[in-house]
Image (spheres, grey):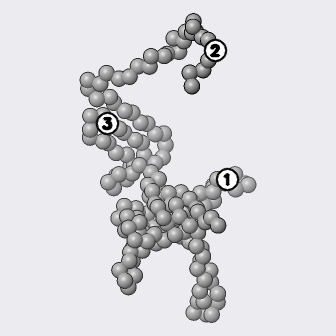
Amino acid sequence: MLNHIVIMGRLTRDPELRHTQSGVAVASFRLAVDRDFQSRDGGDRQADFIDVVAWRQTGEFVSKYFAKGRMAVVSGRLQTREWTDKDNNRRTAYEIVADNVYFGDSKRDGDSSGSYQRAETGSYQSGGYGGAQQSRYQQPTGYQGYSSPVSGSDFAELTDDDGDLPF
């Protein structure tokens, strides 16, 4: 049997990190995942709100680097939990147990604009979350670059073609 799910969405609140009695870290959070289609009346897209649980190092990673509004990609498995509430009603919860959590955006170091720069020989600039995004890469000084030996009109026919393929 296969139980694997991958979702991408934004955190609806900051992750909540707890520890079990034996000291195992567990983080819980909720993702708002947009549906691929709009409603029939042409309104806004609908979203599903999916609970996620991340254990051990993954949970600590999520609680340290993710916050409300941050885009996350979660890979894991779907799990159901059943219990009886205080009014003796049967309840069922559906949640994803995260195996891996990845960044889904380019936000760095608390920069609310979503942009960052790399302070090396080249620089990389990325736009924010909304509107048009611009990116540009500057070559390091003294960089010779690479030019392809074959450009658009540099093709030539082989003169000694015997019809045998070289592999």
Write the residue at 73% across / 55% down: 40
Residue 99 in the image: above or below residue 129? below
Labels in figure, total? 3
Q: Visible in this render: residue 5?
A: yes
Rounded to the nearest angstrom, the CA distance separating label 3 from label 1 is: 37 Å
Nearest to N terminus: mark 2 or mark 1: 1
The one nearer the camera, 128 or 83, is: 83
Q: Which mark is residue 15?
A: none
**Mark 3 surroundings: few (<14), some (14-19) or many (≥20) residues within 10 A:** some
Amino acid type, label 1: Phe
* Residue named by callout 1: 37
Which is more N-terminal, label 1 or label 3? 1
Q: Position of residue 167 (x, y in %)?
A: 57, 25
Picture layout, residue 24 above or below residue 114: below
The residue drawn where x is 49% and y is 16% is 151
Kindly identify which residue carries mark 3: 123
Q: Position of residue 3 (x, y in %)?
A: 61, 66
Tell me if I can see residue 27 in this picture. Answer: no
Q: Measure the alpha-carbon separation of dots 2 and 1.
A: 52 Å
Q: Disc 2 designates what residue?
A: 163
Q: Are marks 2 and 3 in contact (CB under 8 Å)?
A: no
Residue situated furthest top in the rendering: 159
Q: Position of residue 64 (x, y in %)?
A: 35, 64
Q: Name the kind of residue labelled 3 in the image.
A: Ser
Q: In terms of image quadrants, where is residue 32?
A: bottom right
- Left or right: where 7 falls relative to 119: right
Q: Amino acid at mark 2?
A: Gly
112 or 106, which lies in front? Answer: 106
- Mark 3 residue element: loop
At horizontal 28% and vertical 29% (from top left) the residue drawn is 140
The one of 122 and 113 positioned closer to us in this rendering: 122
Q: Quadrant of the N terminus?
A: bottom right
